[in-house]
Image: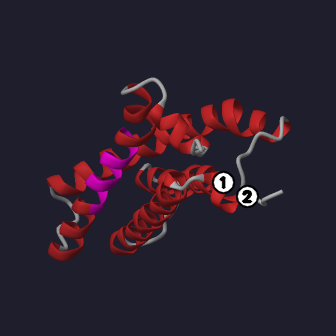
Amino acid sequence: MEKMMTHYMELLATNQPWNLILFMAIPVILAETIAITELAILFTRNLTGGLRKLNKIASIIVGLYFSGVFVYLFINAVIPLTMNGEWRGFADVVAVGFYLSGIVPLLGMALLDMGVIGRKRTELARLKLHATFIGIFLVVAHIAMIFGMLDPSLFMMQM
């Protein structure tokens, strides 16, 4: 019996190593950089140092980068899969849905660091919101990874 793959895992496995780099490595490495620098900033309360600059740059880059990923995958994967009824069950939808939901916290951090949102907040309040955004991204990304690695037939109805 051959195991099925979720579309999430199939995307990462296809066109090696480029899809893995473009859709997983770049966003996750930037998010982990943000998470680590965020902790250091919160512990030291140094809101103006080099770590904060690195944190802001990484946040803006990943937010804008993932916006492109989101639009590309929505147009080239989500819409065709939905219109053609090609989803591979619950795990497949959860994996792709949670992966793409990462746009909310990633774009939120970018907009926060570009001064588009949260302008009236104190620097510390913006940093707390920023930390919340990165925490949300890490949760949704891990849910996407967990469901993405499942055999989608586990959740499909047996005929």
Q: Main secondary structure of the magenta part?
A: helix
Report helix, strand or loop for mark 2: loop
Residue beneath disc 2: 156
Point out the image quarter for the N terminus.
top right
Q: Nearer the viewer, residue 18 or 54?
A: 18
Q: In the rendered view, would you say 31 is above or below 26? A: below
The answer to whether residue 116 is visible is no
Q: In the rendered view, would you say 12 is above or below 121? A: above
Check contact, mark 1 vs mark 2: CB within 8 A: yes
Q: Position of residue 134 (x, y in %)?
A: 40, 63
Point out the image quarter for the C terminus.
bottom right
- What's drawn in magenta, residue-wise? 26-35
Type of the residue with mark 1: Ser
The answer to whether residue 34 is visible is yes
Residue 10 shown left or right of residue 42 in the figure:
right
Q: In the rendered view, would you say 6 is above or below 130? A: above
Residue 135 shown left or right of residue 44 in the figure:
right
The quarter of the picture where residue 44 lies is bottom left
* Residue pictured at 40% horizontal, 26% vertical: 16
Residue beneath disc 1: 153
Q: Nearer the viewer, residue 58 or 87?
A: 87
Q: Position of residue 36 (x, y in %)?
A: 23, 61
Q: In the rendered view, would you say 2 is above or below 128? A: above
Q: Nearer the viewer, residue 120 or 52?
A: 52
* Residue pictured at 64% horizontal, 51% vertical: 92
* Residue pictured at 54% horizontal, 58% vertical: 147
Res 11 label: none
Type of the residue with mark 2: Met
